[in-house]
Image (cartoon, rainbow, N blue to C red):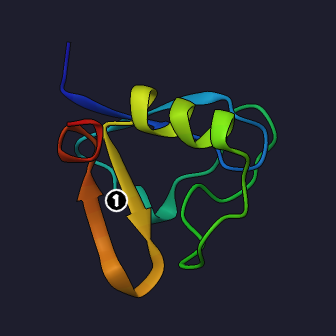
Amino acid sequence: MSQANQNVCTTCSAINWIPASQAASNGKCSKCSAALFTGKPADMSAARLKRQIAKSTFLCWSTYGCLDAVYAAS
């Protein structure tokens, strides 16, 4: 199996797999078709943020760039 990254949709909280060979910035949710990366901070509850941290391979915040979820969870 080829390597893939996992990302939680900020719109519907579905878990999405993004192949390592595909640009993550072009990813769309497999459930609701929303863009996975909008370049803007997402407004979400504490529970949804915890799911993002626990289930995403990486997290992105606007101009702050990407923060590795392993670092965020520690």
* Element on which disc 1 rests: loop
What is the x, y in percent for residue 5?
Answer: 31, 35
Query: Looking at the image, which is closer to me, 16 or 67?
Result: 67
Q: For the point 31% across and 37% down, which residue is it? A: 57
At 50% from the left edge and 63% from the top edge, which residue is drawn? Answer: 26
Q: Is residue 42 above or below residue 44?
A: below
The residue where tag 1 is placed is: 23
Asked whether 25 or 9 is in front, the reply is: 9
Left or right of residue 7: residue 68: left
- Residue at left 19%, top 22%? 2
Label 1: how many Cα within 10 Å (few below 14, some 14–19, many 20+): few
Q: Quadrant of the N terminus?
A: top left
On the image, the x and y values in percent for residue 6 come to 39, 32
Q: Residue furthest top?
A: 1
Residue 7, percent across and down?
A: 46, 39
Q: Amino acid at mark 1?
A: Ala
Q: Nearer the viewer, residue 24 or 1?
A: 24
Snapshot quadrant of residue 73 = top left
Count numbered badges in the picture. Answer: 1
Residue 23 position in % (x across, y down): 34, 59
- Taking the image as shown, residue 7 lies to the left or right of residue 72, namely right
Give the position of the C terminus as an image quadrant: top left
